[in-house]
Image (spheres, rainbow, N blue to C red):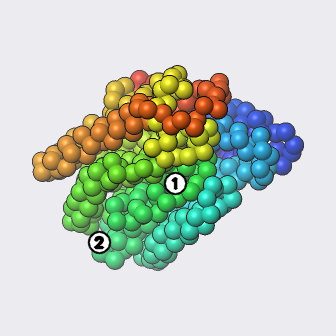
Amino acid sequence: MMKFLFMMIFMIPFCFMKNMFWMVQMMLFLLMFLFMNLSLSLNLFCNLSYMMSCDVMSYGLIMLSIWISILMIMASENLYKMDFYVNFFLFNIIFLLIMLFMTFSTMNMFMFYLFFEGSLIPTLLLIIGWGYQPERIQAGMYLLFYTLFVSLPLLMGIFYVFNEIQCMMIYFLKFFNLNIYMLYFSMILAFLVKMPMYFVHLWLPKAHVEAPVSGSMILAGIMLKLGGYGLLRLMIFLQEINLKLNYISIIISLIGGFYISLKCFSQVDIKSLIAYSSVAHMSIVISGIMVMNYWGFIGSYILMIGHGLCSSGMFCLANISYERLHSRSLYINKGMMNFMPSMSLWWFLLMSSNMAAPPSLNLMGEISLINSLMSWSWICMLMLMLISFFSAGYSLYLYSFIQHGKYYSGIYSYYSGVSREYLMLMLHWLPLNILILKIDYSMIWF
């Protein structure tokens, strides 16, 4: 694992050389290829390994981080064309990737906290530096204060745990059981805001709408997964108290998920709609983790990977329309099928994955999560039914609204998709639907 870290660190000088935009991307492709071909014995793979503590959970999420970073560079060709601070942009992406890599491959709680919060800075720079509207500064402040306000209690909680048991290794915490209400809420709240849970989700649509395409992709693809990863890791020593208090998070998440699914129908901004759909998906993930059974854990993990690829792809599609029409309004982006018929196939494929149609990872994840929530209480069925139904509803609503209808008369100066964009969408969609063939790696952990 150290070799990958060094490779990323030594890529930083490349970022500041001239005409190295695609070279950095190729280097990341090489990194991804090397990472995929790690000769992991399954024995190491299921338990905590010597490879900078990289187990199944870390492995999948690191792979997703590298993949999304490659696609971020691919989606941002416009910056390269305009030469809009490209070197700093590349440096930002590599720095963010190093931060995420370290977050997912550390077992020390304090180091985890450090990199968890450190990944916020490059994201903030992406939004403020390369965003589109002047409101991006307000969106950056929302992002910063929502996450920083709840991360201090997490730090205090980590120090308290260290003071109590003289140990910061997450792996050894399974021998302890800290049954303290204040500790539970302080440890868990930071991750729930990052997910984001309903009631603390307002920063997400704001950040997405103001962020450039690369910012949206990394926010939807990886940043939301940090919260889920943190919960899955730290649930080890909060088990007993979580079984007493989990109904709070589950009720808020399920009812909030249903409400947000309805809210999607009233959006007029494409990016805003996709951002709200992320909140609806993540609400099911939170519920699955909180139930704390095996189906819930693996389901939340699979849905996090699936949602990362699917949501990122949808933001790419929104950006492809935005680059041509300079508007993200649903009313202007109508009748796209007349202009870009081949692109409407990709819209359809990614929308169908978003509403958990087979053979996407989202389907597998949602089935597992529904299974886990039903085993906890049959009353969840009502909310799950509504969320699943409206999830399909807003996906179809977005697709039919954009692709069909009478197109806006001012868009005749127009060109169809280029091969780079089709490749980018293919690289989102293919892993999302092919990985289900190797689902056993995600399903067999312990």
Mark 1: give few (<14), some (14-19) or many (20+) Cα within 10 Å. many
* Residue drawn at 38 percent across, 47 percent down: 277
The amino acid marked with disc number 1 is His
The amino acid marked with disc number 2 is Asn
Element on which disc 1 rests:
helix
Mark 2: give few (<14), some (14-19) or many (20+) Cα within 10 Å. some
The spot of residue 291 in percent (x, y) is 25, 53
The spot of residue 303 in percent (x, y) is 38, 41
For discs 2 and 1, the disc positioned in front in the rendered view: 1
Q: Is residue 146 above or below residue 14?
A: below
Q: Is residue 180 above or below residue 196?
A: below
First in sequence, mark 2 or 1: give its number. Answer: 2
Q: Toward the viewer: 99 or 272?
A: 272
* Residue drawn at 49 percent across, 60 percent down: 206
Q: Is residue 141 above or below residue 385?
A: below
* Residue drawn at 76 percent across, 35 percent down: 22
Q: Please, which residue is most extreme toward the right here?
A: 18
Residue that badge 2 annotates: 179
Gap in Å between the C-alphas at discs 2 and 1?
Answer: 37 Å
The numbered mark at residue 208 is 1
Q: Is residue 396 above or below residue 374?
A: above
Image-based side of 96 in relation to 258, left or right: right
* Residue drawn at 22 percent across, 59 percent down: 251
